[in-house]
Amino acid sequence: MIKREHPLSLSKQCQLLKISRSSIYYQPVGNSTRDLELMRLIDETHLKWPFLGSRRVRDELVDHGYNIGREHVRTLMREMGIKALYCKPRTTRPQPGNKIYPYLLRNMEITRANHVWAADITYLPMAKGFSYLVAIMDWASRRVLAWRLSNTMDVSFCLEALEEALTLYGPPEIFNTDQGSQFTSEAFTDMLSAQGVKISMDGKGRWMDNVFIERLWRSVKYEEVYLKVYGSMAEARQGLRTYFEFYNDHRRHQSLGRRTPAEVYWAPLAHAMAA
């Protein structure tokens, strides 16, 4: 927007655009090494005890030898997109003005592929920084249908994952998410509505509804991310690509009768072809 090589002075450009001149000189400062260490510990603590709030997370960090205040913990948790899981009116703050859809899964039995999909975003620690991972999962089979990695929490990487899932597997009957701004955005909901998908969003007292994808995050981090400590986004993408192939095609789930997500997802198609 601001062009330093433009004939107009920087001051005049800022005046015309009605922005502060000081903002064009600001250089964002990355997280310190100490903060990255703290964020890694906060992430591990949240995975173990997702019901802990900032006060009790702070106590855990103090037990690890870190002198840190609660407000600093709250700031880091907010940056990571982490909140304690417990019954409350809203588990995630939606963007003001975005439409909130009703929850459709109450007392519903979900036993077949492409009946319900779910999506969520998680924080991933890296050697020098961090990133965010979004995944779209088939509820009945636990199969990861699409995923994307990003270093920002905007909606674009969520849209890319959704578009890939819809293109490869067709639309589900219902798509369930929390009320995060990425999922309540018009761009995201319009893509679902255009495919005739019913949109469902977790509401009051529904904090356990994405429990399957929360378990996915635990598996991804303890079986892949924490063991590798990715040095770059490219390395992270390659590692996650390999892991999700393993997760879908080889990792057996006790809750699925010792079958893999891919076996459960494709079983109806196999039966139909046999018939």
Image: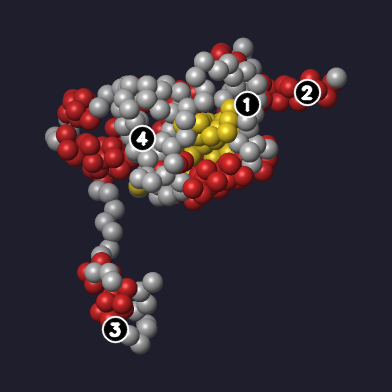
First along the sequence among labels 2 and 3: 3
- Per the image, the residue denoted by label 3 is 9
Give the label on residue 115, or none.
Answer: 1
Q: Earlier in the sequence, mark 1 or mark 3?
A: 3
Q: Are marks 2 and 1 in contact (CB under 8 Å)?
A: no
Q: Nearer the viewer, mark 2 or mark 1?
A: 1
Identify the mark at residue 216; answer none if there is no mark: none
Q: Work out whether mark 4 precedes mark 1 in sequence or the reverse, and give the earlier one.
A: 4
- In the image, is 144 to the left or to the right of 78? right
Per the image, the residue denoted by label 2 is: 270
Does residue 110 sit above or below 72 in this rendering? above
Q: Amino acid at mark 2?
A: Ala
Which tag, 4 or 3, sits closer to the chain's start? 3
Density class for disc 3 (Cα within 10 Å; few <14, some 14-19, many ≥20) is few
Which residue is disc 4 drawn over? 92
Q: Nearer the viewer, residue 186 or 21?
A: 186
Nearer the N terminus, badge 2 or badge 1?
1
Distance in Å between CA atoms under marks 2 and 3: 67 Å
Q: Which is more foreground, mark 2 or mark 3? A: 3
**Image coordinates for residue 175, horizontal then vertical, percent:** 55, 33
Q: CA distance from mark 2 to mark 4?
A: 39 Å
Residue mark closest to the camera, 4 vs 3: 4
Amino acid type of the residue that numbered disc 3 sits on in the rendered structure: Ser
> Is residue 257 visible in the rendered structure shown here?
yes
**Element type at marker 2?**
helix
